[in-house]
Amino acid sequence: MFADFFTLRWSKSANSCLLNDVSHTPGIRQAQKQQSRRALLDAGLLLLEHQNLSSLGVREVTRTAGMSPAGFYRHFRDLDDLGVALVEESLASLHGMITAILAGEGDADQLIDRTVDVVARHVREHRAHVRFLCRERHGGVQPVRAAITAELDAFIVEVAAALGTQEQSAAWSVADLRMLSGLYVEHLVSTAAAFLEAAEEAPGAEQRIAATARAQLRLISLGRLHWPTVG
Amino acid sequence: MFADFFTLRWSKSANSCLLNDVSHTPGIRQAQKQQSRRALLDAGLLLLEHQNLSSLGVREVTRTAGMSPAGFYRHFRDLDDLGVALVEESLASLHGMITAILAGEGDADQLIDRTVDVVARHVREHRAHVRFLCRERHGGVQPVRAAITAELDAFIVEVAAALGTQEQSAAWSVADLRMLSGLYVEHLVSTAAAFLEAAEEAPGAEQRIAATARAQLRLISLGRLHWPTVG
DNA sequence: CACTTGGGATGACAAGTGTTCGCTGACTTC
DNA sequence: GAAGTCAGCGAACACTTGTCATCCCAAGTG
């Protein structure tokens, strides 16, 4: 995500937008700015571990980022703005995870095992991002909520398209594919949330969550196999 | 929920707890206190429509409840305390809904249709409660989060027990029953959340959500029918 | 009836908040 | 090199906040 943004600003501007075209300035200054921006985002992510976005304060964020309060406004209009930036970041990493899952080969059970493993690892490696998404998906800040919902819907469409190429559901209607995809994505999110909570209490809980998630995915697979196609 | 609490305090104390035994005092005073308490809870519920619990303020709540700030502390130690009270209230109403679902007769498809209808109606009639639960389930206030998780886990056990009595899954192991039950409860919660958002935008969205939820439940039912029992 | 109880209001306290202003100084450009 | 840009700072604004000591008076008690 950060890389995308960076190269976006760096690429010779093929678009006609001149307003923010600063691609002619060499690196140092921009890099410093991006570093500060990153510090703000990380500070937000850190504070959101025990808080909600709607209770976050500008001064709080800048303080933990080691910056003066006024500096915040050089990067974000609002705290909502920072929130939306965090959504983009978090969902970019999650998108990588989903493509990793969908690209896999093997029979159904292998695919299920690998899926759960990938989710568990993603939660372990991107704990703050996952927590942010789960916490603000139904949170009190409307723009952030809308952004998460929109991107998650895009995932559903993407997963539905991928499911359409699988032999198990080749003859399915588009609506049914999207229905199944929605079930999968929802299950994925709730499994990630379970992993999140699990790691904060019992150490063996992660195994239990994984086993349950695998069984649930197998049950859904069985349902898929016997789903009446309209053909 | 309120009625339970009320009658709890009113019933002649068969328990041995003398600490809070005020059952000998006649009604007016207690009723006034309960009325104030209710006003605080309702104010909280109202404010939480556009906020998160962690960003709620004592003054804010008392102001919209028409009360002085100090009055709050006559009823709750904290805002977290108020949050936990709201959890109990919200999950009591949800518990009624679940028993209403489980008590039903009829074949699988009828049961699915009725389930989705009951959920839709519950969301319509207890919007604030449902919103609160969805919002704070993964929210930033640990005690509230824990309370919701605990009560939801109790629901899962209850639903699992009910599923064990159904002929479709009579031979299932306890672990499998709980796995299936978890899938159902998770699906129920996410469907309720979807209804919640749906009502705030497109008017026809509710029908679409309901249709998708029914299809997903049917698919899970198919999976159930073909689940390998250890027999 | 006098007397106790306790829910609620008032007012005050220090500590925190979002946001804006003008300034500085390192980086960039010409 | 001189000129200019602009991220970050310090200070100040006018609030809002949680919490408490204190008083008040309706409800309950004997």
Image (cartoon, coloured by chain):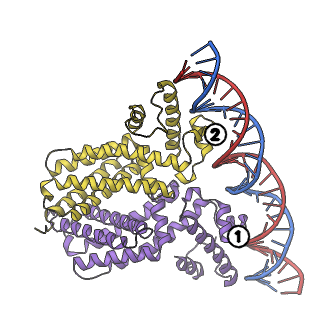
Chain colours: A yellow, B purple, C red, D blue
Instruction: Measuring from the top left, give residue A209's x and y in whole percent.
Output: 32, 52
Location of residue D26 by image quarter: bottom right
> Mark 1 — on which chain does it sit?
B
Q: Nearer the viewer, residue B99 or D4?
A: D4
Location of residue B206 by image quarter: bottom left
Residue B182 seen = yes
Question: Which quarter of the figure is the C terminus of chain B placed in?
Answer: bottom left
Q: Nearer the viewer, residue A20 or A159?
A: A20
Rendered view: A164 above or below A35: below
Instruction: Measuring from the top left, give residue B40's x and y in whole percent.
Output: 63, 70
> Mark 2 — on which chain does it sit?
A
Task: Determine if marks 2 and 1 fall on one subunit.
Answer: no
Which element is circle 2 on?
helix
Disc assigned to residue B67: 1
| Label 1 Cα crowd, 10 Å radius (few <14 / some 14-19 / many 20+) | some
What separation in Å lies between label 2 and label 1 (alpha carbons)? 36 Å
Relative to B192, is B48 on the left or the right? right
Rendered view: B139 above or below A21: below
Which element is circle 1 on?
loop
Residue A51 seen = no
Q: Looking at the image, which residue is at 66% across and 74% down?
A: B36
Which amino acid type corresponds to the residue marked 1 in the rendered image? Met
Total label count?
2
Q: Looking at the image, which residue is at 13% across and 49% down?
A: A107
Instruction: Measuring from the top left, give residue B111's x and y in whole percent.
Output: 27, 78
Disc assigned to residue A70: 2
Outermost left residue: A231
Relative to A164, is A190 on the left or the right? right
Q: Looking at the image, which residue is at 22% across and 80% down?
A: B107
Location of residue B155 by image quarter: bottom left
